[in-house]
Amino acid sequence: MRLAVYGKGGIGKSTTSCNISVALARRGKKVLQIGCDPKHDSTFTLTGYLIPTIIDTLAEKDYHYEDVWPEDVIYPGYGGVACVEAGGPPAGAGCGGYVVGETVKLLKELNAFYEYDVILFDVLGDVVCGGFAAPLNYADYCLIVTDNGFDALFAANRIAASVREKARTRSLRLAGLIGNRTSKRDLIDKYISAVPMPVIEVLPLIEDIRISRVKGKTIFEMAETDPSLEPVCQYYLNIADQLLAQPEGIVPQDTPDRDLFTLLSDFYSNVTAEKAPALV
């Protein structure tokens, strides 16, 4: 199974990805997580440090693929999750999609791409351009991480549009939304009433999830010394179980940005009106 996880920057996508990877490993799967952000920090909570990137390793070898070994680019992470960081070009100086393509090419050369039960691509999703949409070319499912806010759902709709376009020629499907760091889901519900799609899980606003990133640990690792976090781990195990059941998934319907903007704006306007004091 190959998963592509997208979401607006700062939404907690990489933290979510790492915890899902560990949850899948806990279910007995051999997991590889590929970070597809030039910041190369996707796997930080799995390894505790910033691992060297594939693109930098290739540059050091003058792009002689035959001189690269698996241990040069694949690093062990917590819970047995294997970690790869694709890396990327300097800002404004190249295409992220090219880097993803080179990453997959190298992993195939190393006979590593097909050695895992699950490959999870963690992808920058603020603007799903042709380059950062590249992981969708290799994925069976897309997961979208969002919160209960306007900006994240607006980005989610753009990601859903990319899934729809890729699904025209591939078996790609949208597995659904994962709500993250939210105490309520009313705006999420408003969105999926207009753009029907599954909601796989809604993670509550738990401070330990947020600070786990700073500590460089997954919530599973933190739970080893703090058993009170075991119920939090269960959220990610629930996500893993749903994915391993191989859901049918959907091809998202077309919802123009303008229509979505109106829908979400009207929601906020109505909420504001309801909270306003009555005039006498």
Image: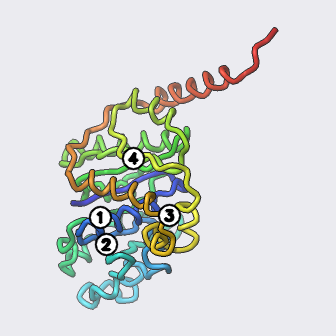
- Residue 266: image x %, image y %? 57, 23
Of labels 2 and 1, earlier in sequence is 1
The residue tagged with tag 2: helix, strand or loop? helix
- For residue 69, above or below residue 263: below
Residue bearing mark 4: 201
Residue labelled with disc 2? 103
Q: Nearer the viewer, residue 85 or 63?
A: 85
Question: Visible in this render: residue 41?
Answer: no
Q: CA distance from mark 1 to mark 3?
A: 21 Å
The C terminus lies in which quarter of the figure? top right
Q: Name the residue beneath numbered marker 1.
A: 24
Residue located at (35% from left, 54% from top): 133
Judging from the image, what secondary structure is the residue with disc 3 in? helix
Query: Is disc 1 placed on a helix, strand or loop?
Result: helix
Q: Which residue type carries mark 4?
A: Glu
* Spatial CA span between label 4 and label 2: 30 Å
The residue positioned 38% from the left and 84% from the top of the image is 57
Element type where label 4 sits in the image: strand
Amino acid carrying mark 1 in the image: Leu
Mark 1 or mark 3, earlier in chain: 1
Which residue shows up at 18% across the image and 79% down it? 111
